[in-house]
Amino acid sequence: MKMSVCVHENRKSRASTGSMNIYLFHKSSYADSVLMHLNSLRQQRLFTDVLLHAGSRSFPCHRAVLAACSRYFEAMFSGGLRESQASEVDFHDSIHPEVLELLLDYAYSSRVVINEENAESLLEAGDMLEFQDIRDACAEFLERNLHPSNCLGMLLLSDAHQCTKLSELSWGMCLSNFPAICKTEDFLQLPKDMVVQLLSHEELETEDERLVYEAALNWINYDLERRHCHLPELLRTVRLALLPAIFLMENVSTEELINAQAKSKELVDEAIRCKLKILQNDGVVNSPCARPRKTSHALFLLGGQTFMCDKLYLVDQKAKEIIPKADIPSPRKEFSACAIGCKVYITGGRGSENGVSKDVWVYDTVHEEWSKAAPMLIARFGHGSAELKHCLYVVGGHTASNWLPPGFSISVTQTGGAV
C-alpha cells in the first residue's frame, strides 16, 4: 500500500509575493521492499562481497547488511583486523550452519521462526555474533517455556549469556522445585559454584533437609576422584543440625567419606553438639548449621472450638488451607505466644479451672513435638510476649491476685530459661 503526504505552503519573499508547492512522499513499505531486493541479490550472489563459512556450508553476503544488524560484523569489517579486508570469514564449527542461516535470513528479512528446537542455539549464536534482538527474543521465548524439567539447563544458559530475567526466573523455579531437580542428571553435572549457591540458598524449598544432604553427597560421588576435595564446602551448605537426630547419628556421622576428612568430620561433630542443645532445650543455638531456611518459615494459629485454646494449626500459604498440627498439652486462655527460630513458646494463661499458670510450653516445629521449659517466676495471664535477639520478653498482664499495669512488670529470658 502506498501512502503519500502533500504539503502546500505559501511563502513570501522579500522582493515579491509568490507561492511554492512542497510534496513530501513517504513509502511505508520501502524498508521491507529494499530488504526483499537485497535478499534476492544475495540469493543470486549479486554484489556480495564476503563469504561466510560454517561447517561444510558457505553463505555469500553483503558486508553493509551484516554490519547494519550486528555490532560483531560492524567491528570486524571496520577495524584493522585481517577479516576487515578478507573476502571470506570461516566460523568452522563454532556455529551450526543451520543456525547461521537463520541469523542471515533475519538480517535480510527482519523475520525468524523461534521454536523449542532452535531457541537455545539461536540465543547462543545471537549472543556470539551480537544480534541483540535475536538474543532477547530467544530469551523471552525460553522464559515463556520454562519448566522444572529444563530450568537447570536454562540457569546455565542464562548465566553464560547474561540473560538477567531468564536467570531470575530459572533460579526461582530451581529453588521451588528442588525435590525434583536434585535427582536429575542435570543437577549432577552442575559446576561446583552453582551447586554451592543452590544448596546454601535461604529460599531453597525443601520440607526435609535430608534431601539437601543426599544431593550434596550424590554430586560428590558423581565424580568422586575430582570432587571429594569439595566435600567440606558442600557440607557447609547443609543445615546439618536440622536433620533428624537418628539420621544424623546413624547415617551422617558414620559416613566413610566424611570420616576420612578432618574438616568434614568437624562440621558433623559441631552439628551433633547443636542438635543435642536443641533437643535438650539448652539455650540459644546460633550456629549456621541450625538456621532454618526462609521458605521453611510458617504461620501458626492457636485456637480451638471452645472458649479454651486447645489446638495448634499451620497455615499452608501455597495450598491456601489451614492444617491441624497438634493438640496443646494443657488447654488455656488469656495466655501469650511467641516464635523464636523454629519453636513456638506459650507462656502463662488460665486453665480450665481458672487457675493462673506460670508454665512455659514449647512446640518444636521441626520435630513436631511439645516440651516443657523452665516456668515463669510469676504466674500470669493477659500479658504480652515478644522476641528480641533470641530472648523472650514478657510484659504486663495479671497475676493470680492483682492487676499489673502495662509496662511495670517485665521479665526476660534466654529461650529455655525462666521467665
Image (cartoon, helix red, strand yellow):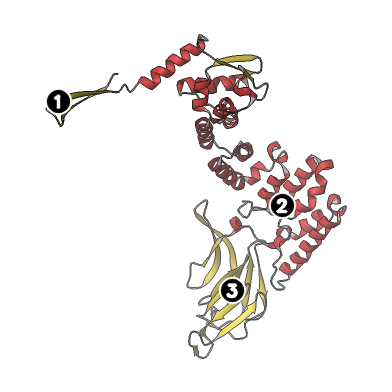
Q: Which mark is residue 131?
A: none
Q: Secondary structure at mark 3?
A: strand
Q: Residue at x 82, y 46 (%)?
A: 228
Q: Nearer the viewer, mark 3 or mark 2?
A: 3
Quarter of the image holding residue 342?
bottom right
Q: From this view, report whether residue 268 is shown above or below residue 405.
A: above
**Real-space CA distance between mark 1 and mark 2, rounded to the nearest whole angstrom:** 89 Å
Looking at the image, the residue that sits furthest to the bottom is 401
Q: Residue at x 48, y 87 (%)?
A: 405
Amino acid type assigned to the residue bearing label 1 in the image: Ser
Q: Nearer the viewer, residue 34 or 126?
A: 34
Tag 3 residue = 388
Tag 2 residue = 210
Disc 3 + disc 2, Cβ < 8 Å: no
Looking at the image, the residue that sits furthest to the left is 17
Q: Secondary structure at mark 2?
A: helix
Amino acid type assigned to the residue bearing label 3 in the image: Leu
Q: Earlier in the sequence, mark 1 or mark 3?
A: 1
**Real-space CA distance between mark 1 and mark 3, rounded to the nearest whole angstrom:** 85 Å
Tag 1 residue = 19
Q: From this view, report whether residue 87 is shown above or below residue 160.
A: above
Q: Nearer the viewer, residue 416 or 119?
A: 119
Question: For this view, does 128 lie left or right of residue 305?
Answer: right
Disc 1 + disc 2, Cβ < 8 Å: no
Q: Nearer the viewer, mark 1 or mark 3?
A: 1
In percent of width and height, residue 351 lies at: 55, 79
Q: Secondary structure at mark 1?
A: strand
In percent of width and height, residue 32 lies at: 40, 20
Q: Nearer the viewer, residue 370 or 104?
A: 104
